[in-house]
Image (spheres, grey):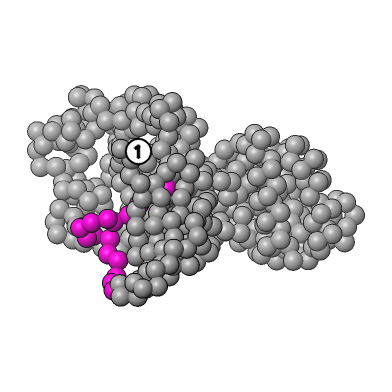
Amino acid sequence: MKLHHIAIWTFRLEELKEFYVRFFGGKSNEKYINPKKGFESYFVSFGEGTDLELMSRTDVQNTPIEENRVGLTHFAFTFPSQEEVLRFTEQMRSEGYTIAGEPRTSGDGYFESVVLDPDGNRIECVYRKTANESKNKARQETDIENIPPVTLHTERLFLRPFEERDAETFFACCQNPNLGNNAGWPPHRTLDESRRILHSTFINQEGIWAVILKDTKQLIGSVGIIPDPKRENPQVRMLGYWLDESYWGKGYMTEAVQGVLNYGFEELRLSLITATCYPHNKRSQKVLKKNGFIYEGTLHQAELTYNGNIYDHQCYYLPGIFQPTPEDYEEILHVWETSVRHTHDFLTEEDIQFYKPLMQEHYLPVVELFVIRNANGKIAAFMGLSDELIEMLFVHPDEQGKGYGKRLIEYARDKKQMDKVDVNEQNEKALQFYLHLGFQIIGRDKTDSMGKPFPILHLQLPEANPGNRN
């Protein structure tokens, strides 16, 4: 037995027929007309799947379609890949159709979005991995979700899993109200309470470390990266930490966080690490900013604390930076061209076509490339480094304003000890961006490296600036 068709009443018969034919590849029969009853209909077929009957009749009431009602609530079309669901969703958005459900992975393993047809009927666009793909994905997610009990080392600290012997020091730290009130939990009242919390929340918990001073072996705090409850992407983790008040202001937590970030991005290959803190917790905000976190916004009235206070959450994020492969060059070139057309209004079409093959064949292969990808895995920004300076930095126009450029510059400065960059003098936005980050103009060339009449400014960070050059 097979479900033959689903029928829909509509006042937009022709529009609805064209919608399903154009966007879902349906094939329609000739319109059936019954003049006596004022009835018209189309059958739209989709290969071997269930047909869709679109019906119109003059006496059918036009009642609103509600999602939460008894009866048929939606129907679904399958797509060949997750990327196709994303592409189709964005196409629908650009065509002006309503996206009723943003792309997500459902609890039963479907990657799906929901769009509304012209009448407001809900259409699920779904993709489900094959058995082999699901096994590979589960293996990858398990690798992330099940963080092994590793010990991390920094200059002054080592980060290890919590142990039973930490209970007394743990209690000594956590009975301080200045600590708990900044993190949203009540001060510990007894050693037994601390033991219970230690066992339930810290010992044998994946991705949570005790912060230990190397020279004294003293427990001084905790740091961890755990699944972010606000985000469904398994490649995202949320940072959390606390530090005994006796050790505030000495840079220990900034150092511990840096060690965990390195582990999260380099070993776990996370795409994003997030963090939240209360607006009044200035020390925590300072730690996040020192580690390059980007302020995302305020989630108002986000938390009801143990003592009845309602606090906002200040939200931060830090995207991962990765090195691409030559297979990514085509996508990188697309980001370059899209960005250049958006920002380099002094270039003609002839200029862009002149530089494009040079970029692809000569420039990209000789620099050390780094990219940031967005939530859909697409390259949002990239940077190219030579032995002595930042040769190129481009951000896709759709991704600008998210802090990606600053993140890449800070990576080049802190990880690669790069302090120089060149920029087109006519690219005023880029120049102001670098000046805002502290770069200073140390020289100027009247033409670019190809002898074209596009002046180049040489910039350098002041702490490494030995003098001007012209």
Q: Is residue 142 left or right of residue 433?
A: left
Residue 98 drawn at (x, y percent):
43, 64
Q: Name the foreground residue: 252 vs 311.
A: 311
Q: Name the foreground residue: 306 vs 336.
A: 336
**Magenta: main secondary structure:** loop
- Name the quadrant of the C terminus: bottom right
Disc 1 residue crowd, few under 14, some 14–19, many 20+, Cα 10 Å: few
Q: Is residue 67 magenta?
A: yes
Q: Which residues are magenta?
A: 61-77
Q: Is residue 465 magenta?
A: no
Q: Disc 1 on helix, strand or loop?
A: loop
Q: Which residue is depicted at the point 43% across and 56% down?
A: 43
Q: Which residue is depicted at the point 39% across and 46% down?
A: 50
Whether residue 19 can be seen here: no
Q: Which residue is depicted at the point 43% across and 70% down?
A: 12
301 relative to 332, above or below: below
Q: Name the foreground residue: 391 vs 93.
A: 93
306 relative to 369, above or below: below
Q: Is residue 257 left or right of residue 245?
A: right
- Name the quadrant of the N terminus: top left
Q: Amino acid at mark 1?
A: Gly
Residue 13 drawn at (x, y percent):
44, 67
The residue under label 1 is 109
